[in-house]
């Protein structure tokens, strides 16, 4: 959508082909409905802690049906607004499944479309569990938004961002939850200090964690599913949620007819400016397999349109924030401490959100952060945060890294009081 909107604003004639609903995965079966559900359970958590804040709440519970209706309302409102905006701006919306007939001709089902330039942005879908029988109680992330029952017990296969977010959600709704991760830690791509803190928080809430293990065998036992892990241990659950990676939605595009090459797994092969192997065909977003987050796809789309209009740019992927909307949240951007090859060149400045007043006002004192910087210049090159609301703080560090801001310059900034961000200033103020 962002590519279409940007192209229209730059004076290009634009058609948008969509086989399902405007907004793609993120709006309809991804980011937006998930975060709506998570926000609802955050309200539930606050209600249960109301006594700590001097407020009496006689009953605090959540109905999945009501939560689902709310997320559908949120999604529908946003989708209607976006579609109306697209149409009013003059973008033609064609409902149909796109299939290439040639390099510049596309079959959209009920009509054929010819275009000078084509941008492929078909996204991705949950990778299916292979080698196991189909079962109505083996779920995928897409299924959650039509789920009408809260599982008594739930095994989540894959402890990446999606798996961890749903672990927190179903735990809050009353399920006995266990996450299974083949790597040695949950959220294995993020900073180890942060993921250790989240694991502690999970266990305190009763979420089981099994790492360094894969799903070896499942067997139906009446109303439950018995699972065996590769470590030899196992358990019994009412439902399984599979969140073990994504796969590109490219298999039905007939890319070979357009001369577009793909990599192993079906990912579209592109160069540094998102050009495919075919002239005038570009690809962005999840289907190229670089950063599978909506905000990366939007920026990639803007860059492609800029190139088409003679305004070339490039994207520094290290500046794209990673956010996990657990409770507490995890957020990161830039260099990781574990990625420092020369410890004499880089340093890590660490701090706690619990050191400032706002954390105590919110009763959210479980939070840490670290700022990675060059020792000789003090230039900030990375930031990693675990705590309440860090999704709203991390973009500050994206800008700081982009502008090559130094710790000395950060020290001169006045932070409002009382805020969680003061913890950052406090930590910087402690260095010489």
Image (tube, rainbow, N blue to C red):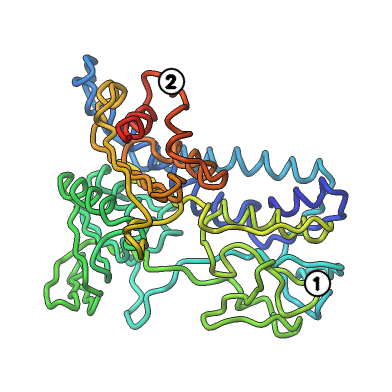
**Depicted 50 relative to depicted 217: above or below:** above
Element type at marker 2? loop
Q: Is residue 70 left or right of residue 116?
A: left
At a point 29% along the width and 61% down the height, the residue shown is: 156
Element type at marker 1? loop
Spot occupied by residue 410 in the image (x, y as percentages of width and height): 45, 33
Disc number for residue 312 = none
Judge depth for marks 2 and 1 and give the one in front: 2
Q: Is residue 332 visible?
A: no
Q: Find residue 214 and report its image quarter.
A: bottom left
Q: Earlier in the sequence, mark 2 or mark 1?
A: 1
Question: Mark 1: few, some, or many residues within 10 Å (few <14, many ≥20)?
Answer: some
In this view of the protein, which residue sits in the foreground, 147 or 50?
Answer: 50
In this view of the protein, which residue sits in the foreground, 78 or 138?
Answer: 78
Disc number for residue 416 = 2
In this view of the protein, which residue sits in the foreground, 188 or 319?
Answer: 319
Q: Is residue 26 visible?
A: yes
Q: Which residue is mark 1?
A: 280
Spot occupied by residue 421 in the image (x, y as percentages of width and height): 39, 30
**Depicted 235 relative to depicted 202: above or below:** below
Spot occupied by residue 213 in the image (x, y as percentages of width and height): 21, 73
Q: Is residue 122 left or right of residue 7?
A: left
Question: Quadrant location of the C terminus?
Answer: top left
In this view of the protein, which residue sits in the foreground, 330 or 352?
Answer: 352
At a point 21% along the width and 66% down the height, the residue shown is: 211
Q: In 3D space, how far apart are the residues under numbered discs 2 and 1 (Cα atoms)? A: 49 Å
At a point 25% along the width and 65% down the height, the residue shown is: 180
Q: Residue furthest left?
A: 233
Spot occupied by residue 306 in the image (x, y as percentages of width and height): 77, 55
């Amino acid at each position: 959508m962002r590519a279409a909107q940007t192209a229209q604003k730059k004076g290009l004639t634009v058609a948008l082909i969509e086989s399902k609903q405007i907004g793609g995965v993120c709006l309809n079966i991804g980011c937006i409905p998930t975060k709506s559900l998570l926000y609802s359970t955050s309200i539930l958590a606050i209600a249960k802690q109301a006594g700590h804040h001097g407020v009496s709440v006689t009953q605090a519970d959540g109905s999945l049906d009501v939560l689902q209706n709310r997320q559908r309302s949120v999604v529908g409102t946003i989708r209607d607004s976006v579609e109306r905006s697209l149409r009013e701006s003059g973008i033609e919306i064609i409902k149909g499944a796109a299939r290439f007939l040639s390099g510049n001709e596309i079959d959209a089902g009920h009509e054929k479309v010819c275009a000078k330039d084509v941008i492929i942005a078909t996204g991705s879908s949950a990778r299916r569990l292979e080698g196991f029988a189909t079962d109505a109680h083996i779920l995928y992330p897409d299924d959650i938004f039509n789920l009408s029952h809260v599982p008594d017990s739930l095994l989540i296969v894959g402890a990446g961002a999606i798996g961890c977010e749903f672990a927190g959600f179903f735990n809050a709704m009353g399920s006995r939850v266990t996450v299974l991760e083949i790597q040695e830690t949950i959220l294995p791509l993020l900073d180890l200090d942060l993921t250790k803190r989240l694991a502690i928080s999970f266990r305190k809430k009763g979420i089981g964690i099994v790492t360094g293990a894969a799903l070896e065998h499942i067997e139906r036992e009446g109303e439950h599913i018995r699972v065996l892990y590769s470590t030899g241990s196992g358990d019994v659950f009412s439902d399984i949620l599979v969140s073990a990676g994504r796969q590109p939605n490219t298999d039905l595009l007939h890319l070979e007819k357009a001369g577009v090459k793909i990599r192993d797994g079906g990912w579209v092969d592109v160069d540094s400016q998102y050009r495919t192997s075919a002239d005038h065909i570009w690809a962005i977003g999840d289907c190229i397999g670089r950063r599978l987050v909506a905000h990366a796809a939007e920026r990639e789309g803007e860059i492609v349109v800029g190139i088409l209009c003679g305004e070339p740019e490039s994207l520094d992927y290290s500046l794209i924030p990673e956010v996990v909307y657990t409770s507490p949240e995890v957020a990161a951007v830039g260099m990781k401490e574990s990625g420092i090859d020369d410890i004499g060149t880089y340093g890590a400045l660490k701090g706690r959100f619990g050191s400032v007043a706002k954390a105590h006002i919110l009763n959210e004192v479980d939070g840490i952060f670290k700022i990675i910087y060059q020792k000789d210049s003090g230039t900030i090159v990375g930031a990693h945060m675990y705590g309440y609301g860090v999704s709203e703080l991390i973009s500050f560090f994206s800008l700081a890294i982009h502008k090559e801001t130094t710790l000395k310059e950060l020290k001169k900034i006045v932070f409002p009081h009382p805020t969680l961000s003061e913890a950052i200033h406090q930590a910087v103020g402690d260095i010489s």
